[in-house]
Each structure stands twice: as C-alpha cells, then as structure tokens.
Image (spheres, rainbow, N blue to C red):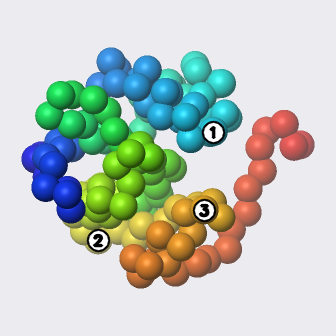
Amino acid sequence: MKLELNDNRNVFVRPYVTTDFNSIQALNAEEGWHNLAEKNESTKRAWENSNVAFVAETEEQQVIGYIRGMTDTGISLFICELLIDKAFRGLGLGTVLLRYVHDLYLTTRIEMLASSSSRSFYQEHGYRAFYGFRKTYLEY
C-alpha cells in the first residue's frame, strides 16, 4: 500500500518477508533494543510466527519502520513492537502503521506496552493506559 508522509514523501507498507530481517535488526540495534537485536534467532522466530507483521519502506526499498503483533482477529490485537527510523519520526508513519493494522481487524481492541519515551505518542493518539504484568522464563 502506497502512503504519503506529512513531508510529501511516499512510503510503502507491505507484509514482512524473510529478507527484511537484517534491516529490522539494524533498526532494533540503532534504537538500543538490545534484547531483540542480540537474540537473533529468537527474534527471527517471533517474526516468522506473528500474524501481524508489516514493514514500511521508501521508494528505494529501504526499510524505515515496522509493526509486529498478534491477533485473534475478533477481540484482541496486541502490538509487540512498533519502530520507526529516527530520520522518519514525526511524519505520521507510526500513526499510519497503527491505523493500517487496526483497519485489517476492525472489531479488535489494540493493546500494547509502551516505554517512557513512547508513552506520550500513544496518549496523544487517544490510547489510554492500562496495567498488566510481565514475567520471563528466567524469573521462575
């Protein structure tokens, strides 16, 4: 799907393919998301098993953002990660990606975790905070 950013540049949103993985990992590393960037095989497996997996790319086919998640297609749409290249932030791409996947599953509610730096983005777009819990396997 072709989209126009707020600065009139065109980007394309399309389903993830395996050849996107290195570009995604480069974005993760640049963002400092070491848990994803350093666990290469686990992160790749997560992408391969996600039923919501889209990338945004420039006309030159440079991956500049992505959204990954899971849905039951009826009630819940959980966004695992949404990441936009720093050079393309503030141009509406994150908003477009969220809307794009929500449009695919109209009856679902979007749920996600937010970092302290992304919290204001979600609040500005009408998302409300809720509380949850997390535990990794290593914490047993």
Mark 2 lies on residue: 107
**Residue type, mark 2 in image:** Thr
Residue located 57% across and 31% down the image? 29
For the residues marked 3 and 1, what is the alpha-carbon distance in whole angstroms? 13 Å
From the top left corner, tell me how far across and down residue 84 is, in percent.
41, 47
Left or right of 71: which side holds 29? Answer: right
From the top left corner, tell me how far across and down residue 90 is, in percent.
36, 61
Residue 23 visible to an observer of this rendering: yes
Q: Quadrant of residue 114?
A: bottom right
For the residues marked 2 and 1, what is the alpha-carbon distance in whole angstroms? 34 Å
Mark 1 lies on residue: 32
Residue 14 drawn above or below residue 115? above
Mark 2 surroundings within 10 Å by alpha-carbon count, few (fewer than 14), some (14 through 19), many (20 or more): few
Mark 3 lies on residue: 117
From the top left corner, tell me how far across and down residue 24 is, in percent.
43, 30
Q: Earlier in the sequence, mark 2 or mark 1?
A: 1
Residue 22 drawn above or below residue 115? above
**Residue type, mark 1 in image:** Gly
Residue located 21% across and 37% down the image? 58
Residue sitting nearer the eye, 2 or 86: 86
Residue 17 drawn above or below residue 14? above
Residue located 41% across and 60% down the image? 77
Left or right of 139: which side holds 31? Answer: left
**Residue type, mark 3 in image:** Ser
